[in-house]
Structures are given as structure tokens and as C-alpha cells.
Amino acid sequence: MKKNDLEKDSVRRVKIDDSADGQRLDNFLMARLKGVPKSRIYKLVRGGEVRINGGRVEVSYRLQLGDEVRIPPVRVATPVITPATHLPQGGIRLLPNIVYRDDALIVLNKPSGMAVHGGSGISRGVIEQMRLELPECRYMELVHRLDRETSGVLLIALKRRALVGLHEAMRGGRIEKRYLTLVAGRWPNPVQHVKLPLHKRVTDDGEKRVTVRDEGQTAHTIFRRLQSFADFTLLEAELKTGRTHQIRVHTSHLGFPIAGDDKYGDFELNKRLAKQGLKRMFLHAAQLSFEHPISGERMLIEAPLPAELATFLDNLNAQAI
């Protein structure tokens, strides 16, 4: 934003809808008065220039559905760059990948190779793409993340109440996440609890790297052996914690790298697998179980294996016959 590119607004009266229900007043104002110092916003509230339903409130007031917020005239920096407001011709579309949708949330079967957020050289991620494809949704935020290379179930909140509720459920361990992964080698145990602390660092070129270290964060994965092949094992991985690259690092550290993993895997093996048709990492977020943040209904959402992973498994089964 340019500091000298300012405009003066008139008084605005904003009716609170689902997108801001439960949000603190100061955070609500900062999102709408970009470029205005936080101290100035606090002064507006404490001086009574900002009012809720005609009355004074504290900056910590939590907005409620139907509240009317009076926002006084204030100088706001005008953004120089206008974000994209229409879909370009061609390219990927995510609406066909929606596996569940209601007025509070969307569950997407995210394709491999697509980041959840734009940035770091990526012009548009899942959330930016979804906002373009569903411009009628006034509120849309990611509930959690998946690695760019990982496919599968991804939660997107369409109401602030849904986002807050799901985040509380995640912190309380009330969302069950299960993945399918194919690892190199013969996994020995039918069920195995792996508790190895993980340490995350960022390299000089901005790449995230995770290693097992005693001083790292607690990380717990439950692996269940689903099918054994001559040189591979299909596993279900249940996340009890949600650390960066958790499944990938736990399997690699134990000597069972994920097939196709270009960061922690067996690079020579990956080259051979690419020639056999597996040109991505075999890691798929297959299932999410949680209570609906608005209705309280127990939800079980499943995303089928993408065709390229299912085909590779079929080929392994055919070789085993």
C-alpha cells in the first residue's frame, strides 16, 4: 500500500453476519481499516466513535449475529494491487472435487501438487482458487493444511463460528485424521504407535525440513498395516498430533520411506517408480471424523484414492498373483 494514497470514508453501518459472528471488535475493525494503526483503532473505540447498536463497548467485545457496527470516517490506505476477481480460461477447477458441502463448511478432496495457500512463488493455492470459484461465499477460510504433494480431505469453513469450533476441536484432539500411505519395505507390526519428537527448521533457501530430535515437539502416529507386497506395505496412519511432515518423517526415520516422497524418501527408488507410473508421493488424507461445529452431528468424511494411486496399487496386486 502507498502511504500517500489515502481516501476518506463516510460513516459506515455494518450489519454483522456469519462471517464475523463471535469475532473481537478490534480484530474486526483492523480487517476493515487496513493501514490504520492499532492505537488509532483503540482510540476510536474508547472515544465512542465506534458504536455497537448505538452504544459504547470495549475493544474486546465479541460481535454477535445481527449487531450493527458504526464505523466513523477514517483515512484508510488504498491497496495498489487488486486481487483477481475472475477465473482465468482453462486450468484446474476444484468444485468437482467437493465431497461434502453445507452452509457452514466445505470438504474438498484436494489434488496432489496444489498448495493450500498461494505464496513462495505460487500464484494461487486452494483457498484462493475456491474464492474465485465461489464468489458468493462471503467468508471462506482453511481449517487446517495439507502438504502440497498430499491429496485428500481438506476442511474449509464458510462461517467464522465453524472455523472457531473446528479449531477448538482440533486443539482438544476431537478430530480424527486417517491417511493412506505406501512405504518401501515390509512393515513388521499390524499396529504400531510411533512417538518420535520432531524438530522443524527452515533452510537458507526457505525450505521446511523436519528431523527427529529429542528437543523437538511431541509427535504421535498410529500405523496400521493394511496390505503387504513383496517390496512395499500399504499403511493407514492415524495422526494423534499434527506436526509438519509428521507421517513422512516418522516412516523415513524408521527405514520405511514413503514411495515417491521427494524430500525424505529413497530418491533412486523414486526414479524407478516414476517409470512404473507413480510420479507423485503416495500419501492421501483418506478420512476425517469430527462433530459438526454448528449442528453437533457426528461426521465421517471419506475421500477415495486418486486414480493414479489406485492404479499403482492395482498393478502391485497384479504382480503378486
Image (spheres, grey):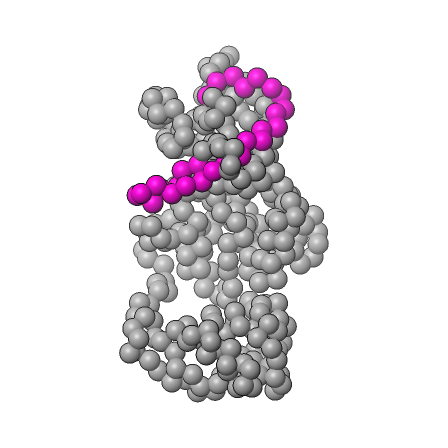
**Residue 53: quarter of image:** bottom right
Q: Is residue 51 magenta?
A: no
Q: Is residue 177 visible?
A: yes
Q: Residue shown at 54%/81% (left/top)? A: 45
From what the image shows, is residue 215 above or below residue 48?
above
Region in magenta: 181-210
Looking at the rendered structure, the number of numbered marks drawn on it comes to 0
From what the image shows, is residue 245 above or below residue 88?
above
Relative image position of residue 251 (x, y in whole percent): 50, 27
From what the image shows, is residue 33 above or below residue 10?
above
**Residue 103: quarter of image:** bottom right
- The foreground one among 37 and 281 is 37
Relative image position of residue 266 (x, y in whole percent): 38, 24
Q: Is residue 186 left or right of residue 129?
A: right
From what the image shows, is residue 225 above or below residue 76?
above
Relative image position of residue 166 (x, y in whole percent): 61, 53
Q: Residue shown at 30%/43% (left/top)? A: 205
Q: Residue shown at 41%/76% (left/top)? A: 36
Relative image position of residue 202 (x, y in whole percent): 38, 43
Q: Is residue 41 left or right of residue 166?
A: left
Q: Residue shown at 48%/18% (left/top)? A: 185
Q: Is residue 299 visible?
A: no
- Which image quarter is the N terminus in? bottom left
